[in-house]
């Protein structure tokens, strides 16, 4: 019997929830994650990788569940002292979290690749689902606003996503080289799942790495995207503003337009079921089901249903 190979493209809280669901499902041993690195940035001389750390902390059950990021049981003595010293402390980095960033930065200065650092951190937290990076090179999402160009963290954390989005760019993307591990994983995938992440700055940043989108298009895998929208609204984060800035509608059609060159199916919430007919007219298989993942059971249930639907639809298409 052929071994099943599943790839999850993930970024942000939605991506972490999807990863948790797969990790607790019957498909855990078949799954690998490709995570977003384009919201990485430097703070207090330390290299911070928010999306990757959210994946690691979530899968290692170290995440602060209330806020959806950072470590649980966290303290902020270092940040308080930095604030007293007159430093900018709008990026809330806890003491335990800072240990991760010190470790990452130290290894980075030693020439250790970002992929290897990620593996070591994942091992420290008992994460068994492999986390791959699309590139080991530095790529930074930048957001153009009425205040000028901001890093994604400045826009997201400091400005609380309140500013209008005029444009988005991925700094360094042209010179970024894809990791062989990511290319091999995509090429060998039976099913590729796009998590309910921001399609522009989370998934879009992964797809923008040279050769990654082309690898998906040529993989022969069944590609299924879980919409991050419920009732035409974002569950968390600025996906609505990002879609609008890209000239896309804030609905299932807008999500489809981000992935249409390689998409086989979409998973949409019951509140968006009016989009089913249109999506099917585009040649997609459509799963309508509750997509809000509020607890571990809902995460596992949704992601299990996504895989089962993908496998059944793939088999039906091949018949």
Image: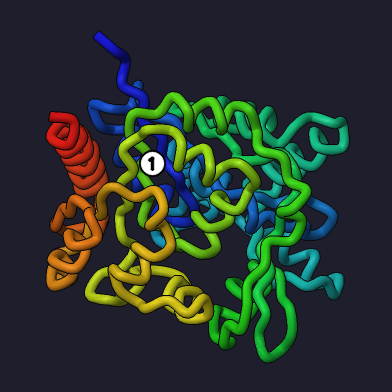
Q: Residue at x 63, y 58 (%)?
A: 39
Question: Of residues 173 and 165, which is closer to you in this image?
Answer: 173
- Measured from the top left, where is residue 308 in percent x and y? 17, 35
Q: How many circles with numbers are drawn on the protein? A: 1
Residue beneath disc 1: 19
Q: Residue at x 73, y 70 (%)?
A: 89
Q: Is residue 196 above or below residue 132?
A: below
Q: Is residue 42 above or below residue 309?
A: below
Residue situated furthest top in the rendering: 1
Q: Residue at x 46, y 48 (%)?
A: 10
Left or right of 305, for residue 97: right
Residue situated furthest bottom in the rendering: 146
- Is residue 61 something that shows in the picture? no
- Measured from the top left, where is residue 228 in percent x and y? 34, 63
Question: Of residues 236 and 285, which is closer to you in this image?
Answer: 285
- Is residue 316 something that shows in the picture? yes
Left or right of 289, for residue 77: right
What is the basis of the colouring in this image? Answer: rainbow
User: Which secondary structure lies at badge 1?
Assistant: helix
Dividing the picture into quarters, in which one does residue 169 lie? Answer: bottom right
Left or right of 300, for residue 223: right
Dividing the picture into quarters, in which one does residue 67 lie? Answer: bottom left
Question: Of residues 222 and 273, which is closer to you in this image?
Answer: 222
Q: Residues within 10 Å of mark 1 (few under 14, many from 20)?
A: many
- Measured from the top left, where is residue 265 in percent x and y? 25, 50
């Amino acid at each position: 019997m052929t071994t099943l190979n599943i790839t999850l493209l993930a970024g942000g809280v939605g991506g972490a929830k999807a990863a948790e669901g797969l990790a607790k499902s019957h498909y855990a041993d078949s799954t690998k994650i490709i995570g977003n690195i384009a919201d990485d940035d430097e703070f207090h001389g330390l290299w911070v990788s928010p999306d990757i750390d959210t994946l690691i902390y979530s899968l290692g059950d170290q995440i602060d569940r209330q806020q959806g990021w950072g470590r649980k049981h966290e303290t902020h003595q270092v940040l308080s002292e930095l604030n007293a010293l007159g430093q900018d402390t709008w990026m809330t980095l806890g003491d335990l979290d800072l240990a991760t960033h010190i470790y990452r930065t130290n290894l980075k200065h030693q020439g250790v690749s970002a992929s290897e650092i990620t593996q070591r951190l994942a091992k420290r937290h008992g994460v068994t689902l492999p986390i791959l990076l699309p590139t080991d090179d530095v790529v930074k999402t930048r957001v153009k606003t009425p205040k000028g160009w901001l890093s994604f963290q400045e826009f997201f954390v400091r400005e609380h996503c309140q500013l209008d989005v005029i444009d988005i760019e991925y700094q360094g993307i042209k010179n970024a080289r894809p990791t062989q591990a990511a290319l091999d994983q995509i090429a060998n995938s039976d099913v590729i799942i796009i998590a309910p992440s921001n399609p522009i700055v989370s998934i879009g940043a992964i797809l923008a790495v040279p050769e990654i989108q082309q690898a998906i298009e040529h993989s022969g895998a069944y590609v299924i995207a879980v919409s991050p929208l419920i009732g035409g609204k974002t569950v968390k984060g600025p996906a609505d503003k990002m879609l609008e800035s890209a000239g896309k509608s804030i609905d299932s059609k807008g999500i489809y337009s981000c992935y249409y060159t390689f998409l086989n199916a979409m998973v949409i919430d019951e509140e968006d079921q009016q989009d089913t007919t249109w999506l099917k007219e585009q040649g997609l298989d459509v799963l309508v089901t509750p997509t809000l993942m509020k607890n571990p059971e809902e995460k596992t249930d949704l992601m299990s249903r996504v895989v089962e639907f993908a496998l059944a639809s793939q088999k039906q298409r091949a018949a």
